[in-house]
Amino acid sequence: MRKLNFYYSLMLLAVGVMAASCSAPQEKEKTLKEAFDGKFLMGCAINVEQSSGRDVVGDSLIALHFNSIVAENCMKCEKIHPEENVYFWDDADRFVQFGEAHNMFIVGHCLIWHSQCAPWFFVDEKGGLVSAEVLKQRMKDHISTIVGRYKGRIKGWDVVNEAIMDDGSYRDTYFYQILGEEFIPFAFQCAHEADPDAELYLNDYSMAKPGKREAYVKLIGQLKEKGIRLDAIGIQAHAGMDYPDLQEMEQSIQAFIATGTDVMFTELDINALPNVFEDGHENAAVEERFEYEQRMNPYVEGMTEEAQRLWDSRVDGMLGLALKYHEHFRRVCVWGLCDQQSWLNDWPMPGRTNYPLLFDRNYQLKPVMKKYVK
Ligand code: 9MR
């Protein structure tokens, strides 16, 4: 009897081993960069905590999932060039070193932007606005010093950021007031001279708006006519629960591609919270601010299932467009790693709990992404 039990146990063990060896091996989940490999680069905007190694968990996720990075803030004029002839390189250097250490396609953001431009840039010693000649010299110094320092290491630059209004008119910035439309080709020329191999981009938000679309198509044509290098249009893609209209976005993608220029989603995030702008307008202008209101912060304890479903469908909608046009999409870049790190917790209303990114507050990839990485 005991012998029988022994053989019986042996048989059970053998059956178990056979079953285990016959069952399909566990499929390892892909990383995001693997999931979209061959389609487009997967980028992430990183903050100085991350580029300096202080966000240890975040850094390991960025290294694992992304093959491109962009500097969220440390290369903006007021940070990197706060006074005339004074540059602050520490954060930008660390950002570039981080990208190189992980073999990433490194993107510089941004050379010419009205916002976050250091105040000295437009002012002469008497406090008046500088002449066109002086502004051009300052732009040239700024661009050639920064692009030159990272020549061959930063592979692409947002040269001009947010130059056009939603209705298609030029934004009334000091660059425009002093130099007119010429400030754009001039900036591109300076960047190209400083690193002839670097890719050069125009970058803007609300690109699904017809006025903006038309203005950019026209601008691309003008730059091409002048023989200016322009590699791709950066569609920032700061989206929300009800904007942009995906059909309008698709029309913009098609219109840009039709000019022979590639496209990218450069600052993708999806604002999960109620739109505080009265007319519900789509926006990413950092200077717009509202007082905190409790009713505008409904998901402090977490999103409702219904809101989550809608949010997920917005992610699928945006990624669907990038996948559909992947032959012309160079990169999809998210504007931050985890929800708690997003600028959208404090813009345009401070102190809200937002859920705009692909990783949650516990550094977990959100369920909506599982189908892409399986
Ligand atoms: O995410 C950035 C935030 O941390 C900064 O405070 C803000 C001002 O510099 O800029 C945010 O990034 C902006 C980007 O540089 C350009 N497009 C709009 C982005 C969101 O405002």
Image: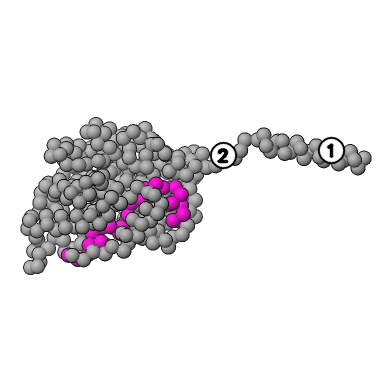
- Quadrant location, ligand no. 1: bottom left
**Local crowd size for mark 1, using a 10 Å CA cut-off: few (<14), some (14–19), many (≥20):** few
Asked whether the viewer can see residue 90, the reply is: yes
Label 2 with label 1: CB-CB less than 8 Å = no
Magenta-tinted stretch = 58-84
Percent from the top left, x then y, of residue 117? 21, 59
Residue most extreme to the bottom:
126
The residue positioned 39% from the left and 62% from the top of the image is 52
- Residue pointed to by mark 2: 27
Taking 328 as reference, is 310 left or right?
right
Ligand 1 neighbours mark 2 (CB distance < 8 Å): no
Asked whether the viewer can see residue 306, the reply is: no
The residue positioned 28% from the left and 62% from the top of the image is 89
- Residue pointed to by mark 1: 8
- Lower position in the chain sequence, tag 2 or tag 1: 1
Residue most extreme to the right:
1
Percent from the top left, x then y, of residue 171? 17, 49
Taking 85 as reference, is 342 left or right?
right
Toward the viewer: 356 or 105? 105
Percent from the top left, x then y, of residue 190? 17, 50
The residue positioned 59% from the left and 40% from the top of the image is 26
Toward the viewer: 242 or 162? 162
